[in-house]
Image (cartoon, coloured by chain):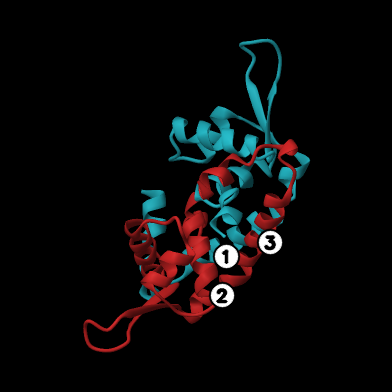
Chain colours: A cyan, B red
Amino acid sequence: MAAAFAAIGGKWKLTLLYWLGHGESHFAGLRRRSAPITPKVLAEQLRELEADGLVERVATGPVPAPVIYRLTPYGSTVLPVVEGVRVWGEEHLRRSPAAGTPMSCVNAIA
Amino acid sequence: MAAAFAAIGGKWKLTLLYWLGHGESHFAGLRRRSAPITPKVLAEQLRELEADGLVERVATGPVPAPVIYRLTPYGSTVLPVVEGVRVWGEEHLRRSPAAGTPMSCVNAIA
């Protein structure tokens, strides 16, 4: 069962798919929007998303032209799921801390 | 944005919420169904889910009676989202490897 959740489970993959759903991006743009992700983790997550066929790297010209990342058509099929998680998560952040300290959220933005 | 995904992002939290959606469970039962999770990671994930108000620990009697874990009513509100991720993930596992080696899935079940 964990395997079924692995391809998009993880806050970073969900975050990256969310931003790529808004349009293609350079590595630096993804890094900025996904702060505080580290370059190492970002590169690793992008490699896994690419290996899973969700994201593609596109060279914009001969080296050293920047590479852009974008969702594949298959990657776009996951956007409704990402949106479901986002809507629930935003609502969760709005809840009163009295109902439970959002520890994992605190960790995520620390 | 990562914060909105943090509370349930992660393959382990999704997996644990999925199983707890089937009914309350002891630690050992969750561990078995969520293999290959380690006890340390399981305890940590359960603590975070509890701190976020999604899961509650219930003592079934005086110590050393086992503790059970179950979804809170609030935790149940996340089940449709978990189901969306699961359905997409199961479909993803069924895809031909030709369309992209499912690296993250391989890692999850290794």
Comparing marks 2 and 3, which lies closer to the viewer? Answer: 3
Q: Is residue A88 above or below residue A20?
A: below
Q: Position of residue B84 (x, y in %)?
A: 66, 63
Comparing marks 3 and 1, which lies closer to the viewer? Answer: 3
The tag earlier along the polypeptide, 2 or 3, is 2
Q: Dot 3: what SS?
A: helix
Whether label 3 touches label 1, CB < 8 Å: no
* Residue A2 in view in this figure: yes
Circle 1 chain: A
Disc 3 marks a residue whose amino acid type is: Val
Q: Is residue A63 left or right of residue A31?
A: right
Q: Dot 2: what SS?
A: loop
The image's mark for residue B77 is 2
Q: Are marks 1 and 2 on the same chain?
A: no
Q: Is residue A44 above or below residue A7?
A: above
Q: CA distance from mark 1 to mark 2?
A: 9 Å
Q: Is residue B39 left or right of residue A27?
A: left
Residue found at x 43% / y 34%? A38
Q: Is residue B61 above or below residue A37?
A: below
Q: Position of residue B17 (x, y in %)?
A: 51, 68
Circle 2 chain: B
